[in-house]
Amino acid sequence: MLRNYIKIAWRNLWKNKRYSFINILGLALGMGISLIIALWINSEIKYDRFYSKTDRLYQVYTRDVFEGNSHTWGGTPHVLGPILQQEHPEIEEVVRIWNIDHRLHHDAEPSLSASGIAADPAFLKLFDFKAISGNTTTSLSRPDAIVLTASMAKKLFGKTDVIGRRVEMDTTVSLTVEAVIEDIPRNSKFYGNDFICSLNYLAERGKTFSDSWTAYNHETYALLTDGASLASINNNIENLVSKHTNGTAKATIYLHPAHRWHLYNKSVNGQMVAGNITSLQLFGLIGIFILLIACINFINLSTAGAERRAKEIGVRKVVGAPKKSLIQQFLLESFILTFLAAILALLIIFLALPFFNNLIRGDLSIGDYPIFFWSIFLIIISFCTLCAGLYPAFVLAAFDPIKTLKGNYLMLNSGLQPRKILVTLQFTISIGLGICTFIIGQQIRFGEDRNAGYDRNNLVYLPLEGNLSKHYEALRNELYQQGVAINISKTWGRISRNGSNSWGYSWPNAKPEDYDVVFNNMATDCDFTQTMGIKLLQGRDIDIYKHASDSNAILLNETAVARMQLTNPLGTQVTVGQGTEYQQDYTVVGVIEDFVWQSPYQNIEPMIVKGPTWSDYIHIRLNSAKSVLTNVEAIQSLIKKYNPDYPIDIRFTDDDYALKFATQKRTAALTGLFSGLAIFIACLGLLGLVSFATIQKQKEIGIRKVLGATVSSIIAMLSRDFVKLVLIALLIASPITWWVMDQWLSDYVYRIHIQWWVFALAGIFAIAIALLTVSTLAFRAAMLNPVKSLRDE
């Protein structure tokens, strides 16, 4: 019997090749897309969950209130780590981390740029990355020890068996390789680091860490003992900062579990309750919607094609076929279609994964999570077979044999058909995704068009490293002499990227609550406004070469002046750490126009630009009279001259500024891709339905043509019902999409306001696509010779 079912199913599918192809392609796209999204979501969920002690791993977070708003961040004081371990026995290990970038080299080989971690000795006990060689449990116990990743070991030595070899760091420190580990996986928060060294080595380089309990410069991680109560520990450590500052600091601390680091990485009202999880939820829903659209196509095409099978069903029921056997027959046909679609879906996945990985900057692979992938694969096949096959099977098996043998089987076209509801649902989802894509694109362009407050053109920067500090003045003079630079500024921080901020400032007439005002911080030696292209509103620029006292001079931006309520800011004394050993006094010498330093979608915050505390970058305003290439080559030549041991790293500010939009652009690209595919799948289904409709109304079309109907009127007749469904879908999708996008935009202070014409444009676009889809087959039906369509069987 099963063999007979398969034979009949295959013959039926082959007989209706066009509809079978549409069904298989639609299902394959839906299955392939949903599986790729499932792979991505699974990889995101697996972040930082592969350590052997993940369930006992926590990061210490700090929470404080600034100007009435609660904030949470991952920075902690340097002195916190030892105190946690000494005073709380339920904490087994504590590790402090300092992120560093250095140049590594060995012997006479060229140095390599590398990112790394300076950590306490227990780091590799908490984060047990797989060792290739060496002993990772004791590898960081010595100050001069270094652990390399396999890639970095191969770059430096050409092999991984390098235990005991020496590595020079920044030409000033020599470290011994104690272990080599596999490259840190992408789903670790430490991904991208090339080496791990001891935190104590920094002291040998003259680096000192503040013992202040309000200097939040480190990340601190804790490993709890087995059976320790998280609630009890958080209660015990909550007021540790306040305790050690005699109540002067109000910050509290708590432990944030490892499995939430990646997904819940955004603070909302002082709670880590948002972040990447929001994107996963969004695209998880999109994946479900796309699979649902594909299943709807299957249901619609199967029920719409019932007229072709009506007499077959009637005959089989008359000769005694039970309803159960008919349902089995149609479910088997559904399974065959689904199975073929699944095979095509696998091909789509293999072809699409490289493109998708490039889009998300990932390296997804079926081989990474084979059990998960194939389990989801089988679940989706079962879901599509049952959900997409059960309804058509029961509908077809329920045909009345007497009516079907008489030819009276058009009951499916009467009243409010489920098919019409499903088509409306399809286009509701597709239109909604299209509107979301358009609004996200609008918001990105809105941010890109915002006045940054400084001139990004012809502005480059390079790290101040190695011997460049020693030879800075000579480099500066030669850049001017060769006509390469118009202006040069040595800075602490980059103009295009937010870096440091601080609080605890006071000024004349400041109130006690002003202590909590957070100021962004940069520093400069001279020519800050001219180099950056920032407008100087009052006073003068900082220039330590002309004014020796400018080491204690500051510039304020407009927002800082307004927040401090200064009517005559020039000459104002601003103090940080008043009454403490860290007290320092500054004098305001100028006021600058606000510029975008943080997110282009947020309000500009108060900023203080100080005289040179220490510097890590050189910003250069290039001479526009020369070509960019000529200027860059001249800079490269001078860097080779003054800093030969270091690679050249010149970067353009406008490229760096563009990175501020990377996350939103990735979201827009993904949403646009998925909405386009959703519309395409929906149109495939619509194409199949129109094809059935033209066959069903073939004789009616012939009669109308005999009576003088024009081609355009026949196309309009066939299109009318489908256009109505699209309009209904637009009416349903618009308020839902408006609410969803309004919630999404609420995260942005600098945002667009959703306009009514967006929905009108989406409606016109959807109707145009529907009409184009419908008219392709409607035109063929309208042009058919009426003699052929009126010919009786």
Image: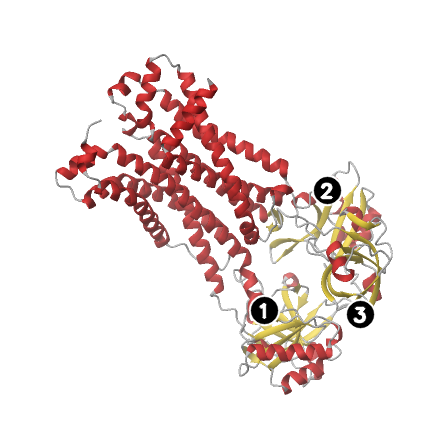
Which residue is label 1 attached to? 560
> Whole-percent x and y of residue 351?
53, 47
571 with respect to 133 (left or right):
left
Distance between the Cα atoms at labels 3 and 2?
41 Å
Residue pushed farthest top? 320
Camera-nearest residue between 294 and 761: 294
Q: Are marks 3 and 2 in contact (CB under 8 Å)?
A: no
Which residue is label 2 attached to? 54
Which residue is label 3 attached to? 108
Look at discs 3 and 2 and give the one toward the viewer. Answer: 3
Give the residue type at disc 3.
Answer: Ala
Camera-nearest residue between 243 and 196: 196
Distance between the Cα atoms at labels 1 and 3?
50 Å
Residue pushed farthest left? 707
- Where is 719 relative to 438, above or below? above
- Where is 393 relative to 345, above or below? above
